[in-house]
Amino acid sequence: MTGAPVRVVGTLGTAQTLAWASSYYLPAMLATPMADELGVPAPTVYAAFSGAMVISALVGPWAGQAIDRHGGRVVLVITSLVFALGLALLGLAQGLPSMVAAWLIIGVAMGAGLYEAAFSSLVRLYGHHARGAITGITLIAGFASTVGWPLSAWMETQFGWRSACFGWAGLHLLIGLPLNAWLPKPLTQTKVDERALAEPTKAVSAPSPASTPERPGFATALLAFVFAATWFISTAMATHLPRMLEAAGATLAAAVAVGALIGPAQVAGRVLEFGFLRRVHPLLSARLAALAHPAGVVVLLMAGPAMAPVFAILHGTGNGILTIAKGTLPLVLFGAQGYGARQGWLMMPARIAQALAPLLFGLALDAWGANALWLSGAIGLTAFAALMLLRAQSHGQ
């Protein structure tokens, strides 16, 4: 793992798997029993979860700035405690206000403890050498739904949804907290500067801020739009894929089977990025990945439900690579200095788009049926167009 010990990648990847499984993937298994006992409609639970994602967007820049200053260990350790608190309060919720409050606390933890914080922690530790490590933790955490959904379902079936929340809170204290505390301390800024002076060839080969267009603010806006567009698509598909495939003519059984292909396809995309695509500039791999979902849309809508597996594989592979691009593109385009705060601002629109995607794409699906895919395909093409407007010079790339 270039520039980063395998121990750090394994530690952070495992902690990220726990963080994603107990937050982003939690409502799919617990929203219905939670709503039934609390006496609220299930969409209300999802609305509270959307509120948590909005809170995470607001927290992101602050968390990134804290990681820039102090390193990821202290921020991620605090985040483990906040996750545990929010999940425990969710398990204790007695009505709508306390349930919403618990989700908002979980949103704070999401804003300071998911991929953006992990990427920022790695960049703070390893600078421009962090690309391989970023890929590595996404490979591990790519199995968060594979672990999280069955474990949440088992705990809910055996002990109830409240005990499932308590169980996840306990795992954050017993596993997540020690893992995050095991991360190394970052170098002080003085030592970072000394290391850069001692390694002049590496410093020269690092992608520099000059590798972006002449207007850095324009480049930042383009990248923020790309992240928002691709996260909108990813969340819309994660929420509505079975229903969308049924609207396209697939049976329910086929839709579920096809949906199961997306997880492995995402991991395959990350393996591809870790292997072959690591030899090319991240901007090129991101452009190719952004085209994958629109290509899948064309195949599915033109050839019919028999091509649904091809759609799932294209979408999943592209989404897996784009997850890595969210960490690597800001690094190669703008450099390591101030990476955490910049990452927080870049991802703020993406988090808001993620929160709105289930509702907006659901409305489009109600109105247009399978033709709603033309909307997501068009959004994917605009993301590709924005990536084409970005350019990078060959400073060691």
Image (cartoon, helix red, strand yellow):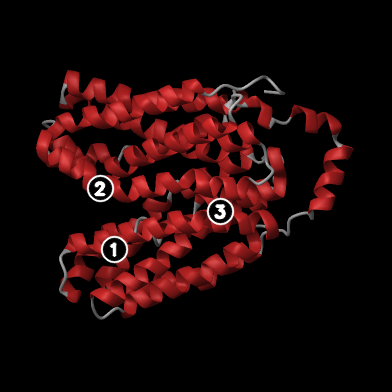
Judge whether residue 265 can be spotted in this image.
Answer: no
Please tell me which residue lies in front, 143 or 134: 134
Instruction: Tell me what residue is drawn at x 52 percent, y 59 percent.
Output: 112
- Toward which corner of the image does residue 373 lie, by quadrant? top left
Q: Is residue 167 above or below residue 203?
A: below
Instruction: Tell me what residue is drawn at x 66 percent, y 53 percent.
Output: 68
Q: Are marks 1 and 2 in contact (CB under 8 Å)?
A: no
- In primary-sequence order, the first of circles 3 and 2 is 3
- Toward which corner of the image does residue 238 lie, by quadrant? top left
**Amino acid type, callout 1:** Ala
What SS does tag 1 mark?
Answer: helix
Location of residue 293 in the rendering, given as x and y in whole percent from the top left corner:
33, 28
Q: Quadrant of the N terminus?
A: top right
**Amino acid type, callout 3:** Ala
Residue 40, numbered circle: none
Location of residue 87 in the rendering, given as x and y in whole percent from the top left corner:
39, 71
The residue pinned by badge 2 equals: 358
- In primary-sequence order, the first of circles 1 and 2 is 1
Q: Is residue 214 left or right of residue 154?
A: right
Bin the neighbour count of mark 1 within 10 Å (Cα to Cα): few under 14, some 14-19, many 20 and up.
Answer: many
Bin the neighbour count of mark 3 within 10 Å (Cα to Cα): few under 14, some 14-19, many 20 and up.
Answer: many
Instruction: Tell me what residue is drawn at x 19 percent, y 69 percent.
Output: 35
The residue pinned by badge 1 equals: 48
